[in-house]
Amino acid sequence: MRAVLGGTINDVVLAVITGALRDLLLARGDLREDTVLRSLVPVSVRPTGDHTANNQLAAMIVELPVHITDPAERFIALRHETIRVKAAHETAATVAITGLARFVPPMLFAFGLRSATSVLRRVPQRSVSTVTTNVPGPQLPMYALGREMLEYLPFMPIAQGLPIGIAVVSYNGQVRFGVTGDRQLVPELTWFCTRIEEGIGELSQRVRGIAHVSRPSSLPDPCVRQA
């Protein structure tokens, strides 16, 4: 998908999650033209050419284009939003996380959550609706006591009054989504998870059609399975 539309795998993940959040708002009758939905998103702050064996993360606040119907246009709008946020150096105001051990995804999520809560304390005037973490894990099989780890299923605790959080991790060629929510605030959590899975297929189908008729530059500039 990113080969056709540009951007990063993180943009693909965010676009699919944005579509599911849009569907949730539509189902509740809460989606309007002026609806603003923000997500706290940890991002890499590793300088170009830095090949040290650690992970360097910060967090940025991204406005999710939930008002856009078309999956591909939503992706493009989201890609431009992440570029805008990075260009505005908004990540500089967040907490950089350095020195994490290599191949330790649970530590990454723990530090990512600390980063998220730290940012929320610093910018309470900006409403953040959700947290989305996408952490690249090892792309080789991992073993413990001679047993291969077949899957890694991420989990993110919700905090600071956030009704829903989405954790994403890649491992050995797979991508897994873990969704945590407050059942009183988001009783549709299971349905929301199915919409993430279905959204991947919808965006993929839309991208296949685009690949046959146009280049990414001709698109308008607006923006796995469930564990």
Image (cartoon, rainbow, N blue to C red):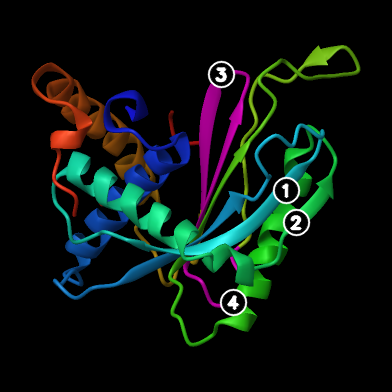
- Mark 1 or 3: the one toward you: 1
Residue 167 colored in magenta in the image: yes
- Mark 4 or 2: the one toward you: 2
Q: Are there few (<14), some (14-19), or many (20+) residues within 10 Å of tag 3?
A: few
From the viewer's perspective, tell me whether residue 134 is left or right of residue 205.
right
Alpha-carbon distance for marks 4 and 1? Answer: 19 Å
Q: Are marks 3 and 2 in contact (CB under 8 Å)?
A: no
* Residue behind mark 2: 97
Q: Is residue 173 above or below residue 219?
A: above
Is label 4 in a helix, a strand or a loop?
A: helix
Q: Are there few (<14), some (14-19), or many (20+) residues within 10 Å of tag 2?
A: many
Residue 126 colored in magenta in the image: no
Outermost residue on the right side: it is 145
Alpha-carbon distance for marks 2 and 1? Answer: 5 Å
Q: Between disc 3 and disc 2, whose residue precedes? A: 2
Q: Between disc 4 and disc 1, whose residue precedes? A: 1
Which quarter of the rendered picture does the N terminus lie within? Answer: top left
* Residue behind mark 4: 120
Q: Nearer the viewer, residue 47 or 97?
A: 47
| Residue 111 falls in image quadrant | bottom right
* Residue behind mark 3: 173
Q: Are marks 2 and 1 in contact (CB under 8 Å)?
A: yes
